[in-house]
Image: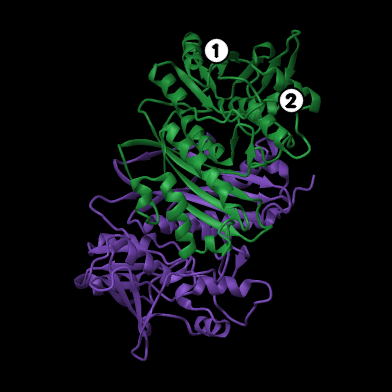
Chain colours: A purple, B green
Amino acid sequence: MNTEKILLDHGSGGKISHALFADLILPLFDNPELSCQDDGAILDFEPGRLAFSTDSYVVDPIFFPGGNIGDLAVNGTINDIAMCGAVPKVISAGLILEEGFLLKDLKIILESMASGAKKAGVKIVTGDTKVVPKGKADKIFINTSGIGILPSGIHVSGNNAKPGDQIILSGTLADHGIAVLTAREGLSFESDIQTDSAALNTMTRQIIESGCDVHVFRDPTRGGLGTTLNEIAVQSKVGIKIYEPSLPIKGSVQGVCELLGFDPLYIANEGKLICFTSKQDAQKTLEIIQKNEFGKDAAIIGEVTHTDPGVVLLQTAIGGVRLVDMLTGEQLPRIC
Amino acid sequence: MNTEKILLDHGSGGKISHALFADLILPLFDNPELSCQDDGAILDFEPGRLAFSTDSYVVDPIFFPGGNIGDLAVNGTINDIAMCGAVPKVISAGLILEEGFLLKDLKIILESMASGAKKAGVKIVTGDTKVVPKGKADKIFINTSGIGILPSGIHVSGNNAKPGDQIILSGTLADHGIAVLTAREGLSFESDIQTDSAALNTMTRQIIESGCDVHVFRDPTRGGLGTTLNEIAVQSKVGIKIYEPSLPIKGSVQGVCELLGFDPLYIANEGKLICFTSKQDAQKTLEIIQKNEFGKDAAIIGEVTHTDPGVVLLQTAIGGVRLVDMLTGEQLPRIC
């Protein structure tokens, strides 16, 4: 048998599935919950509120500068939970593999998942592996779902933005989307642009523990900052104004965007958050974010207005104002 | 725009993604947690232990006699949680769609998910939709993850089988696998064989509430009864003996298996459980199962032995004994 590639048998639920789990997955994700090998993981939780989130990852290519689909999938779900104001505790991993997928690539991806989870203090406690015949999927798709604990008294939601709130962006825009783009066939640039994929749960925890008056956390992934701000404007029925000169963006990323006609406002980020706080706590929150390893380029980029509910406006560098709509059409399919 | 097919834009995270969610998904799965439209769902839980499980569904074809990938995905994860002895409460839905997939088919599948969840008393509280270009996935893959509450004092696990335990199977073998097989191109039989896909959480709850001394619940899905019993024999380090004449199987299913050379012991079931109980509680447990709508064909099919730890033996109708190994190789790929 060719043991260097994924076979349909790896998804059979039988002997070879068990060998894949025992030899590759369990040693990497090792923890008591997963070791039980029951149909689900049993978890002890304190009383209170939980956050529960899911995301599937279909990024193309699966390896790109600074990361791969594995750490992306782990960080992405950790961030979705963290954006609820919760402390992520456990995640699941559901793999869909294409027959013929290289075991060595699977190993690299699983190692990235394990190290990403470890770094973020999260355990991968349950999982599932399916295999489909060659040509019926594209290499590997990963679903991660996760559970976090919401500290009492915290209400962070996209429907909680209030007029006067200041909007902080935790770092440079569009790094992930442009990194994936540059890795795509026929679109390779001489550039050092890397994905920003990172787990932001430490950053959100630091902000919450500081007692700052946070109203909204959100990570501007698919659809980018422009779409995310529109979602919040609609959910909270408020207007949002952002200042173009305040938007942090790397020169190299800006260059690629200009060359190819992409608007960085709509390009995916995977290690950035936006944080809405009351005006009096904005500076303190900004400083907390800037001290975090993933927040050094953070900036206050805008504010919530009384006027124009549901509308996002951009004040440009030359003083004009333009409407920032939700993304229409797809700039970059399979970005996450 | 062609609104009858899934477009890449439906996975963009932008306007068209939001329209799909607002127009199709939210009305079907309607509940307060999902309506919040934050990155995750916020859930109130009592203190205690939770069960957490995940499964991806890649069944081919997506429609088959008696069901489709949607109810299969919902019932499957509900059952994984129920098999932990827990009461399933919420599930997530992660969709991966192929560009060009028919919206009318998606609607049927989502309706099946919604009605399956409703029937089982479970809410679909969070989700995600990705779209990949045509040819990069096969129509639709669905991941469901779920959370259930484990009543205090319950320890039901594959590592908890004890010598002397009686083994109850809740109904006929191999219905799901053979139903899917008959639906596959070029393999259509004149038969009324339907999937047994069903949520078994009411059955497990009834058994637990009866106070019967349950040691193991497990649903024999991929790999079938043979593989599942092997897993338990290994996990619990016990021997298992089952009696061939006691195994419930429909005549039509048996006929297809014989015609095509399949062993029903290794064919997937999606609405059956096996239950290990202490000897004195076996008859009472059997009666509870038989009174449940999905348990009328339940039977005691075997017992746990002191001898041969890790080994499953079948006592045949003519009095011989043969080894039941774990499934090696894949009889029926993409059965769930």
Residue A112 in sight from this viewpoint: no
* Secondary structure category for the residue under label 2: loop
Residue B283 horizontal/vertical position (percent): 50, 9
In this rendering, the answer to whether B259 lies above or below B74 is above
Q: Check the image and report above or below for B307 versus A328.
A: above
The chain carrying label 1 is B
Residues packed near mark 2 inside 10 Å, few (<14), some (14 to 19) or many (20 plus): some
Quadrant the C terminus of chain A occupies: bottom right
Contact (Cβ within 8 Å) of mark 2 with mark 1: no
Specify the quadrant of the image occupied by residue A48: top left
Report x, y in % for residue A197.
Answer: 49, 66
From the top left corner, tell me how far across and down residue A75 is, in percent: 47, 59
Residue B164 badge: 1
Q: Which amino acid, mark 2? A: Asp
| Residue plotted at (47% across, 81% down) | A250
Residue placed under numbered mark 2 in the picture = B263
Q: Chain of mark 2?
A: B
Neighbor class of circle 1 (other Cα within 10 Å; few <14, some 14-19, many 20+) is some
In this rendered view, identify the residue nearer to me: B165 or A77: A77
Residue A278 has which mark? none
What is the tally of numbered marks visible in this picture?
A: 2
Local SS, label 1: loop
Q: Residue at x 75, y 25 (%)?
A: B257
Amino acid type at mark 1: Gly
For the question of whether residue B232 can be seen, the reply is: yes
Task: Give the side of residue B216 with respect to residue B325, left or right.
Answer: left
